[in-house]
Image (cartoon, grey):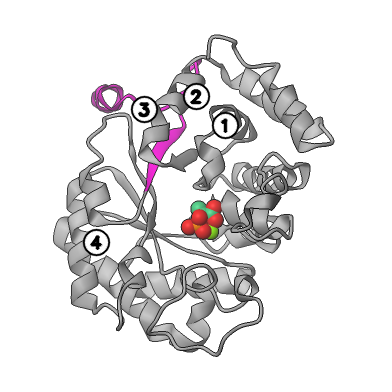
Amino acid sequence: AGLATLADARDDGATADGHRIALLANIGTAEDAERLTDAAVEGVGLFRTEVLFLGAATAPTEDDQARVYARALAALGDRKVVLRTLDAGADKPLAFVTRAREENPALGVRGFRLVRHAEPLIRTQLAAIARAAKETGGRPWVMAPMVATVEEARQFAAMAREAGIGTVGVMVEVPAAALCAKDILAEVDFVSLGTNDLAQYTMATDRLVGSLVDLLDAWQPAVLDLVAATAAAGVATGKPVGVCGESASDPVMALLLTGLGITSLSMSPSAVPAVRLALSHHDLATCQAIGEAARDAPTAGAARAAALALVDPQV
Ligand code: PEP
Ligand code: MG
């Protein structure tokens, strides 16, 4: 009863029939964490820590990082926090990690692939997170970006556990990872779908090219299939599968994702109220029907229309 009261006080996300789905925030700084006073936000599903590194001429020290992470963890108290390790490269170049210019940076050394030539950078970050956890009594989850293989997931999990972090996951934002989700989940405690990059890599469409935005759409059948495959791997293994890409902030997509078995949705904090409202107006069976109808559709437009046809017009 105590827990239920606490949950009610936080106004957790749930369908009309009480199926819970955590509604979390995407943040980039400790200040962002301190601004999350809205009771509707149950925690942080994606802390983009690279924001800390982007302007720096040299790598931030373990001390510098620990201070920032501790501030964020302290602000969030016992709420859930998922910190993503450095996602550098491609659209997020780092001044102090010198690399020869790459012909195709989005397909190059980005995200966790940095471990190949800058492993100490990632180890230092994990040590800083572990230290911040100890200092604050927080229990952060960590995840690595841009993982494509089971070996990478295994390597990251070993590094994070050696650093003393208890809950370890990886992002699923490359089609290969979505297709191997079950085997990846055997190595880690959870995964989180990054639908921005998953759409980019599935549709072979640069996410920075505005004129191709129709291709860069999480409603594209191929993207929906990969999301569904990842969600199914989570259901089969009993491990959490979240979504932290932009698509989680689309209330109709949020219903669909809930129907597929996704366990948390992380988005910009301002999007949370509309998603929570949509969920509260639909039961789980309707969310599942939305998922099935959308996945039967042959185009992104038809998928969206099929989903919308099942949505309560009041929402
Ligand atoms: C994503 O790719 O969907 C994601 C959440 O990560 P980012 O947008 O930071 O690449
Ligand atoms: Mg990404």
Mark 1, secondary structure of its residue: helix
Could you tell me the amino acid type at mark 1?
Thr
Q: Residue at x 39, y 77 (%)?
A: 122
x, y percent for residue 300:
75, 37
**Mark sitting on residue 78:** none
Nearest to the eye among marks 3 and 4: give it. 4
**Which residue matches tag 3?**
12
Residue at image position (50%, 36%) is 249
Mark 2 → mark 1, Cα distance in angstroms: 9 Å
Number of other residues with Cα within 10 Å of mark 2, as a class: few under 14, some 14 to 19, many 20 or more: some
- Determine the CA span between mark 3 and mark 4: 24 Å
Q: What residue is disc 1 on?
A: 258
Q: Amino acid at mark 3?
A: Asp
Mark 2 C-beta closer than 8 Å to ligand 1 = no
Q: Where 152 falls versus 180 (above or below)?
A: below
| Marked residue nearer the N-terminal end (3 or 4) | 3
Q: Check contact, mark 3 vs mark 2: CB within 8 A.
A: no
Residue at disc 2, secondary structure:
loop
Instruction: Residue at 41% x, 69% y: name it.
Output: 86
Q: Which residue is mark 2?
A: 19
Q: Is residue 104 above or below residue 118?
A: above
Q: How far apart are the two marked residues, 3 and 2, measured between alpha carbons?
A: 10 Å
Q: Is mark 2 in CB contact (under 8 Å) with mark 1?
A: yes
Q: CA distance from mark 1 to mark 3?
A: 14 Å
User: Label 4, on which residue?
Assistant: 69
Task: Residue 119: give x, y in percent of width and height.
Answer: 43, 84
